[in-house]
Amino acid sequence: DGGITQSPKYLFRKEGQNVTLSCEQNLNHDAMYWYRQDPGQGLRLIYYSQIVNDFQKGDIAEGYSVSREKKESFPLTVTSAQKNPTAFYLCASSWQLRDTQYFGPGTRLTVL
Amino acid sequence: GEDVEQSLFLSVREGDSSVINCTYTDSSSTYLYWYKQEPGAGLQLLTYIFSNMDMKQDQRLTVLLNKKDKHLSLRIADTQTGDSAIYFCAEKNYGGSQGNLIFGKGTKLSVKP
């Protein structure tokens, strides 16, 4: 089955800890994206990557970091510098930048 | 700046038609999208329309685009309880962050039996 997977589905973190969210796709897409969703809000772009070994900040990159060492993987690290990390995180991919985006199932992060 | 506006809630009875509306500001938008999000899940692409089209129909879904008024609507015919979800309108934006889709806040559709 082709698609985008995110793990884990639920993640709990203590304040002050870094945590890494996984996103994998087997669609052979070049571009990948991370969004954050808060209740009653639309999606806000954290980081995006046009191609392997390249990534750019989105609208709310502070307190987050990413890597793109492999085409199929785009992990997101939520660092302790992120002031309010509790949210639903969505990963997406597209053939190329600006093409139609397809989303993974999301990871709900809760900071205790 | 770029903005996408949607009403937050819509309630309909099973079997009725639902119409979800969206307005956007970027006149250079080439594609406009509708995504569906069920509780606790990711976004599912429902349909999209290219800006040189006025209408697109796909089974129970009809998308209407009024480019002059920058107004997009999604009509769901014969709405079922399984259609209960949040529906996001999004525009492909060429300003700001490259490759960014600008999303509305979503319209929560409740279908009553």
Image (cartoon, coloured by chain):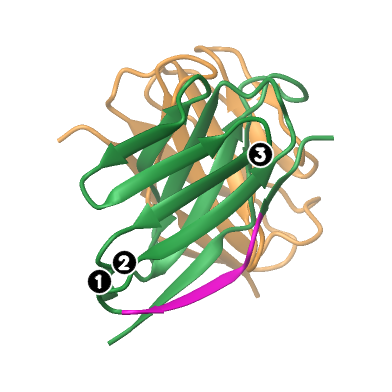
Residue A17: x, y in percent? 68, 58
Given the image, what chain letter belongs to the residue carrying mark 1? Answer: B
Secondary structure beneath label 2: helix
Contact between marks 1 and 2 (CB within 8 A): the answer is yes
* Quarter of the rendering containing residue A44: top right
Front residue of B60 and B82: B60
Camera-side mark, 2 or 3: 2
Chain B, colour shown: green
Residue, far left: A1
Amino acid marked by disc 2 = Asp
Query: From the viewer's perspective, is A77 left or right of A95?
Result: right
Residue type at the position of mark 3: Leu
Question: Residue placed at 40% from the left, 78% from the top?
Answer: B12
The magenta region covers B6-13
Q: Mark 1 packing: few (<14 Cα in 10 Å), some, or many (20+)?
A: some
Does the segment drawn in magenta span residue B8?
yes
Q: Is residue B79 above or below residue B33?
A: below
Q: Colour of chain A?
A: orange
The chain ID associated with circle 3 is A
Which label lies toward us, 3 or 1?
Answer: 1
- The residue identified by callout 2 is B83
Identified at 75% across, 53% down, the residue is: A80
